[in-house]
Amino acid sequence: MRRSFFLALLLAVAPTIAFSAEPRPNILLIVTDDLGYNDVGFQGARDIPTPHLDRLAASGLRCTDGYVSYPVCSPSRAGILTGRYQQRFGYEFNPKWDATALTHGLPLSETTLADGLRTAGYTTGAIGKWHLGAHPQFHPNRRGFDDFFGFLGGGHRYFPGSVVEVEIGAGKKATVSGDAEQNSPILRNSTAVPEVGELTTRLGEEATASITRYARDAKPWFLYLAFNAPHTPLQARADQLARFATITDERRRTYAAMVATIDEAVGRMLAALEATGQRERTLIFFISDNGGPMTKRNANASVNTPLRGQKGDVFEGGIRVPFLVSWPARIPAGRTYSQPIISLDILPTALAAAGTTRDAKLAALDGVDLLPFLTGKNTAAPHARLFWRMDGGEAFAVREGNWKWLHTYHNAPQLYDLATDLGETRDLAAARPEIAARLAAAAAAWNRGLIAPAFGNNPFGGLINRSGLEKNSAP
Ligand code: CA
């Protein structure tokens, strides 16, 4: 009698729970590493076909003016996962690979996108490159992720036991075979697992398995998939290399095979989303963490055409990246979006899509919820200005509308009109001094909200060039 009463109650209530609201979307954030602006099909690459990424682009918006908040790996990721300019909390260099370094990682005072979604009832997973601190206190499982599969450092060789060379700048090379960071264990949560096969392929398989596994649960999920490809070392599967036999430059051929392996993995994930009926209600972001490194340390044969500069620069080639947003249930398909946006927007956009907001007691975000803009409800620019500072104040940049102002190292400030000069070739600082002065003042005002780097790991010697910080801290 009692059992049948509860059964009747359950039947009465269950449909209300299941169908009273639009289901919350799953969120899939795919970050590639050192991918060139022009190295995927949807961006115009001719020599690297990426049919699956192109299909993803066609299912949503290609954001032509999508930026990251820093032109190298780790600070960019700190911005992505917090939605805040990472210099606000002293994150301006790559951290040391050191499990005892308490300050080299994402400060515990910061909350992550995974924290926010987990609190909102999402299952959260991180796969791939972490690079937000090697000390156990910074482990993904302690930063909001229920599940982790990957490695904690800034890079990883792609095949177990392989000996490889990487460019270290000025035409010099070094092997990474003995490099502890490149050889760090592949972990499932905190347990080392055997290395099997090619790493990008494996990360894609893990992501596909997670998508399928999470689909069985009633909870929505957030998956952060951070490929370390196509970052050096340049290594790829033989069958992928064979597909690019017509590319005569060996390094470009290997790079192309690495990008194609990412594309293949994305194809498998899309197929898994479709097979489990989740594609329409999955919000997908696809970006690179910074521009392609063409000639500097860790150069990987990437191409940023038509942009000027590369990884490590505040020219467009360092900070403007391939940027896709797809959510078939809500966001129009097959269009481009050309207002400037930034990776800091991913966190508030994802939280809004999930129907949640941040605790008002937490520090303010710099990113904005892009949904009103991407769905066409709001046609204004999401940001009045975007800002960059690197190396503790050695370089600054500002974008306001089509104007781009920058002040790098010991050079005079420069001003470009990106509407007519995307390649930043004609400096208008002298011709338009009033605009240059306005943007310099805006950069100075923004800079007052930042702090000095909390740690530094300059690979070219010394920690931080304090003279540069002093020189440019009022840009
Ligand atoms: Ca990178």
Image: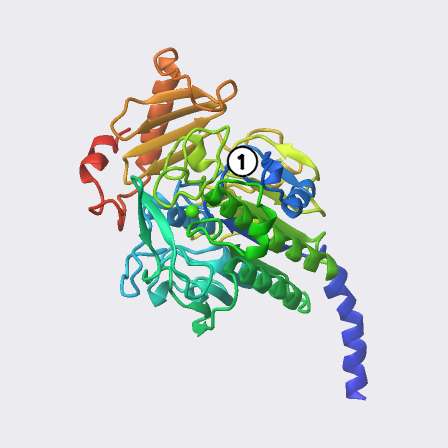
Front residue of 443 and 9: 443
Q: How is the image coloured?
A: rainbow
Front residue of 97 and 386: 97
Q: Is mark 1 within 8 Å of ligand 1?
A: no
Q: Residues within 10 Å of mark 1 (few under 14, many from 20)?
A: many
Front residue of 66 and 294: 294
* Residue type, label 1: Asn
Residue 50 visible in the current orientation = yes
Where does label 1 land, which residue? 38
Q: Is residue 291 above or below residue 160?
A: above
Task: Indicate the quadrant where residue 70 lies.
Answer: top left
Front residue of 474 and 28: 28
User: Left of 285 or right of it: where is 454?
Assistant: left
Residue 441 position, x and y percent, is 33, 25
Q: Is residue 326 above or below residue 317?
A: below
Q: Quadrant of the C terminus?
A: top left
User: Left of 158 or right of it: where is 59?
Assistant: right
Residue 89 position, x and y percent, is 33, 48
Name, please, the residue furthest toward the top.
431
Task: Indicate the quadrant where residue 143 lies.
Answer: bottom left
Name, please, the residue furthest toward the left.
467
Q: Quadrant of the N terminus?
A: bottom right
For the image, the number of numbered tags is 1
Q: Is residue 194 above or below residue 54?
A: below
Q: Is residue 383 above or below residue 285?
A: above
Residue 465 position, x and y percent, is 21, 40
Residue 356 visible in the current orientation = no
Residue 444 position, x and y percent, is 31, 30
> Which residue sits at x=46%, y=70%?
189
For mark 1, give the secondary structure: loop
> Which residue sits at x=33%, y=55%?
175
